[in-house]
Image: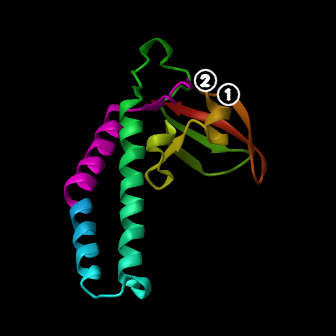
Amino acid sequence: MATEKVFPMTEAGKEKLEQELEYLKTVKRKEVVERIKIARSFGDLSENSEYDSAKEEQAFVEGRITTIENMVRNAKIIEDDELNADIVTLGKTVTFVELPDGDEETYTIVGSAEADPFEGKISNDSPIAKSLLGHKVGQEVTVQTPGGEMKVRLVSIN
């Protein structure tokens, strides 16, 4: 039997997923069922785009519920690693500058389940995070990105 994938995440990330799960189960699921009921009342289901659309949404919602339940069940909470306070690890917020004269960028390295680049949270599986993990402030690191190589210098780790 295959082992379940572990989803590293912060406590806040797990809570956010649990809130989404609760919303999907208590609100969204009922809305979709109501849409299906209304669409059925239109008659012939073979040419009923409202019905097809509602069924597709239902499949998406049920799939998302299953995915989130699996992620929450197999969550591994990232503990604050005080022993490695000066080393880039999962859960740390990292500021770096692209060399030779780039702007400072700050990201929190999280598990893939809670990654959200628009909120400054990048997955530990991303090229930048993979390259930075295990390094210290002041070190220069070469990052392999799909667009090519880039050099960065670590400015701070929190």
Q: Nearer the viewer, residue 24 or 158?
A: 24
Residue 95: mark in rendering: none
Q: Which residue is mark 2?
A: 136
Please give the name of the residue rendered at 50% of the width and 52% of the height, measured from the top-left corner: 117
Q: Which secondary structure is most common in the magenta stretch?
A: helix
Q: Mark 2: which amino acid?
A: Lys
Q: Is residue 76 magenta?
A: no
Q: Which residues are magenta?
A: 1-27
Q: Is residue 104 shown above or below 38?
A: above
Q: Mark 1: which amino acid?
A: Gln
Q: Residue furthest top?
A: 83
Image quadrant occupied by the C terminus: top left
Residue 139: mark in rendering: 1
Please give the name of the residue rendered at 40% of the width and 30% of the height, measured from the top-left corner: 75
Q: Nearer the viewer, residue 1 or 13?
A: 1
Please give the name of the residue rendered at 77% of the width and 54% of the height, measured from the top-left corner: 147
Badge 2: how crowded within 10 Å, few (<14), some, or many (20+)?
many
Q: Residue furthest right?
A: 148
Q: Image check: 115 left or right of 133?
A: left
Image quadrant occupied by the N terminus: top right
| Residue 91 visible, this angle | no
Kindly indicate whether the residue at mark 2 contacts the one at mark 1 (C-beta within 8 angstroms).
yes
Q: Residue 151: where, in percent of width, then height?
A: 74, 41
